[in-house]
Image: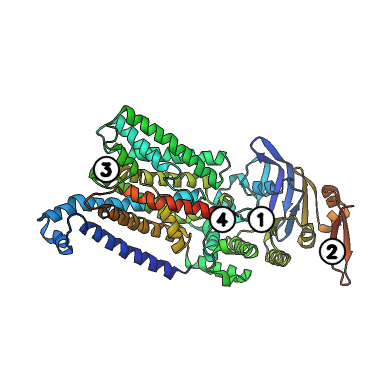
Amino acid sequence: MENNKRIYYIIGLVFLLLISSVVSLAVGTVSISLKEMLALFTDGITTSGQRIVVYVRGPRVIAALFAGAGLAVSGVIIQTILANPMAGPNIIGVNAGAGFGEVLCSAVFPGFVLFLPLGAFLGAFVTVLFVYALGRITGSSKITIVLAGISVNSLINAATDTIHTFNDDAVLNSSSFRIGGLQGVNINVLIPACIAIFVGIVITYALHNEMELLSLGDDTAKTLGLSVSKYRLFFLLLAALLAGSCVSFSGLLGFVGLIVPHIARIMVGSECKYLIIVSTLLGAVFLMICDLLARILFSPFELPVGIILSFIGAPFFIYLLLRRNKNRM
Amino acid sequence: MIELVNVCAGYGKETILHNISCQFHTAGITAIVGPNGSGKSTLIKTILGIIPKSQGEIKISGMDSGTMDRKELAREIGYLPQVRELPAITAQRMILHGRFPHLSYPRVYSKADLKLVDDAMKQMGIESLRYKDVSKMSGGERQKVYLAMALVQNAKTIILDEPTTYLDIAYQMELMNLLDNLKKEGKTIVVVLHDLNLALQYADTIVVMEKGMIQGIGTPNQIYNDKILETVFQVQCKKLKDEEENEYYFFYKS
């Protein structure tokens, strides 16, 4: 694929992101005009609509943008490093691990919200290492990793439920946390998590050549001068940082990290330089639109965005399984 | 030149290679042959540092390989593995990664690197494949792309693990001719081959392996005359000459 086409995709996605952000800020139970939003920059907060934009929809749009981008890039890393297109942060249990870390953290250190992203990151990192090691020991086939992830998912969810059973206050609303949603996002958790996601994506992009070398296989990467073990561990750490940071404020949002890298690959191929940029933008646009749908589909009632994602993601995963089966026949 | 002295290596506690000593000469093709499980791939992976040696010494251009880091080693030896992942990236991008061992931070490929890629594609005759997805190429096209990547790596030695497997006869001959041209340009070629005819036809030196040990090293004529292939593979081998004095070998089971 020639680079011009990729650049057009990137420009298109930037426009789409801007438009979806503005629409997300404007549309809801209370409609806010573009003029009213722009007046914020000149007059400050003077109307109730502007207050909604700044304190309710603004943080939510930022949350959708960063969670979508972070989960998508985490998915790109996991799929590339495990050489497995069916892997994604929620499929192999990384999101569940992050959720467990967060719940454990809130049970052990109640009130210390800044510890939540750290707990989520550690939970995600330990899980991704465990699934990776399990895959290596059992032969590392593509389906083994997925099966190992499903087992780990169940185990971690059981552990998370145990904490909830004995400690109701661990995470205030455990069912919405598990489904995943962006309503009422905690700004104190959102800011450090967004910084971590931004740093994680920038580092991933800076190492796009190294990531692409890993996708060529261990032996080829080694003989091209790459320290394979060191970089693989570092990339898994980055994937955990991204997924953990997202889970810390959005709960267990599924399937973004599975679907988005696939669509990005169809658009720009597997060249990591473009794949990372397009996945970042597409992830943000995708979650923004899904969240908008969650808000307006049954207005004035609101669905958690995790439900919308599951309705899209689960059939997509089945499609991947069917396609894999067809390719083997 | 690559020199091995009493090298032992294996996987975990299992030793596959036993006291291997041999030399791979500059500007020559060395073919490593042997039955399945004889340790051919283990030998080249040990030279490349993919499998650690448990004993012995490996010298690459006079330097102890144990003192070389990954990048130094990559600047000395290019490698075409037998089994490889097939990324959905273009041939141009794939070949460009051959420059990775030469990059320093921030590791950005330059115009000079792209020029080297152009030259290598021209040399391999694959300019038309520049934007073609590697995962959608035929086996023969893919081998040429990997060989072009080894060329831009600018390594003195190129090691290939069964590069002719799954290729039809025309591509096999074409690939071996390309290796012969690289040899003439001064490259050291080490190639693991299953096809004994190709080994006898193209190699300057043949290393015959069995059960992790070297059973014989020599020119194709020496290997043929000493009946080493017959002993190791338990087949009969005959040499025939055509009217133009070209030599051909054929194998049969008595």
Amino acid type at mark 3 = Val
Side of A246 where B213 appears, left or right: right
Are the numbered discs 4 and 3 placed on the same chain, yes or no? yes
Q: Element at badge 3?
A: helix
- Is A174 in front, or is B76? A174
Q: Gap between marks 4 and 1, in whole Å? A: 36 Å
From this viewpoint, is residue A203 visible?
Answer: no
Locate residue B219, reporting x and y percent.
81, 57
Which residue is disc 4 drawn over? Answer: A326
Q: Are marks 4 and 1 in contact (CB under 8 Å)?
A: no
Are the numbered discs 3 and 2 placed on the same chain, yes or no? no
Residue positioned 12% across, 56% down in the render: A44
Amino acid type at mark 1 = Ile
Q: Element at badge 2?
A: strand
The dot on residue B248 is 2
User: Pointer 4: residues within 10 angstroms few (<14), some, or many (20+)?
Assistant: few
Q: Element at badge 1?
A: strand
Q: Gap between marks 2 and 1, in whole Å? A: 25 Å
Amino acid type at mark 4 = Lys
The dot on residue B217 is none
Instruction: Give the quarter of the image for residue B171.
Output: bottom right
